[in-house]
């Protein structure tokens, strides 16, 4: 995996375009002049959580004695389920609490540093831990682009409208399905090789 492919994978699972409506809903009670500060704060918290998980996640896996083929296959299954939800989203029945200003939940976690992003970080770091500077660079790149999109949430929602956002999210979901299937096949192939 290259830095570019890792960054693209992380960007896809962060799904900033799909999170635009969620961000706008969560920030509806925050004054317009303060929204950029709130989004920046939440993005920085999400980045901190993901960096900690990038370096600590591998030790967590070692403690659980999970093999690399199992992790690769599991990552493929998780990404596949996330991609299916992106392509065929369930109706949103959540009723967010009427707060003046969200803090950490839900903007930082799980909208940016969600389970899918953390699982992806765990997967790429476990595969080649010696390349941690590259994985850190990929994380920063994906986070930076996602951050720009989320900071422009109001503008993008007006330009792309709901149909445009849905179309882009579904396209990202289809790309993620292909990546997920490839990861699943790699995990099965690694397991089959280890048996021989």
Image: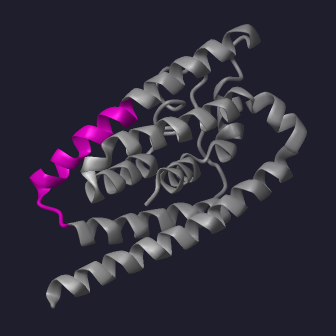
In-front residue for pair 45/88: 45
Q: Residue sitting at 39 percent across and 45 percent down?
A: 135
Q: How many marks?
A: 0
Q: Residue sitting at 67 percent across and 23 percent down?
A: 27
Q: Quadrant of residue 94?
A: top right
Whether residue 58 is in magenta: the answer is: yes
Residue 139 visible from this viewpoint: yes
Where residue 79 sits: x, y (%)? 47, 63
Which residues are the magenta region? Answer: 49-67
Q: Residue sitting at 40 percent across and 80 percent down?
A: 185
73 vs 167, left or right, is: left
In-front residue for pair 23/194: 194
Q: Quadrant of residue 78?
A: bottom left
In-front residue for pair 107/58: 58
157 vs 2, left or right, is: right
Work out which quarter of the rendered image holds the N terminus and state it: bottom left
- Give the color scheme: rainbow, by chain, secondary structure or one colour: one colour
Where residue 175 sits: x, y (%)? 62, 66
Residue 25 visible from this viewpoint: no
Work out which quarter of the rendered image holds the C terminus and state it: bottom left
Magenta stretch, main secondary structure class: helix
49 vs 80, left or right, is: left
Q: Residue sitting at 45 percent across and 30 percent down?
A: 46
Whether residue 81 is in magenta: the answer is: no
41 vs 159, left or right, is: left
23 in relation to 170, above or below: above
Where residue 50 sits: x, y (%)? 39, 36
């Amino acid at each position: 995996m290259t830095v570019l492919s890792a960054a693209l994978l992380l960007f896809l699972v962060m799904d900033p375009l799909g999170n635009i409506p969620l961000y706008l809903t969560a920030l509806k009670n925050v004054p317009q002049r303060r929204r950029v500060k709130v989004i920046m704060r939440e993005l920085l918290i999400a980045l901190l959580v993901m960096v900690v998980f990038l370096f600590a996640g591998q030790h967590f896996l070692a403690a659980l004695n999970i093999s690399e083929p199992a992790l690769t296959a599991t990552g493929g299954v998780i990404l596949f389920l996330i991609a299916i939800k992106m392509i065929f989203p369930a109706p949103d029945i959540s009723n967010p609490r009427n707060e003046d200003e969200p803090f950490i939940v839900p903007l930082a976690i799980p909208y940016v540093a969600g389970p899918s992003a953390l699982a992806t970080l765990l997967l790429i770091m476990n595969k080649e831990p010696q390349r941690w500077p590259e994985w850190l660079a990929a994380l920063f790149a994906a986070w930076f682009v996602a951050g720009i999109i989320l900071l422009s949430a109001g503008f993008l929602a007006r330009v792309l409208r709901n149909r445009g956002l849905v179309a882009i999210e579904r396209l990202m979901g289809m790309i993620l399905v292909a990546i997920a299937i490839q990861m699943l096949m790699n995990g099965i192939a690694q397991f089959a090789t280890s048996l021989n």
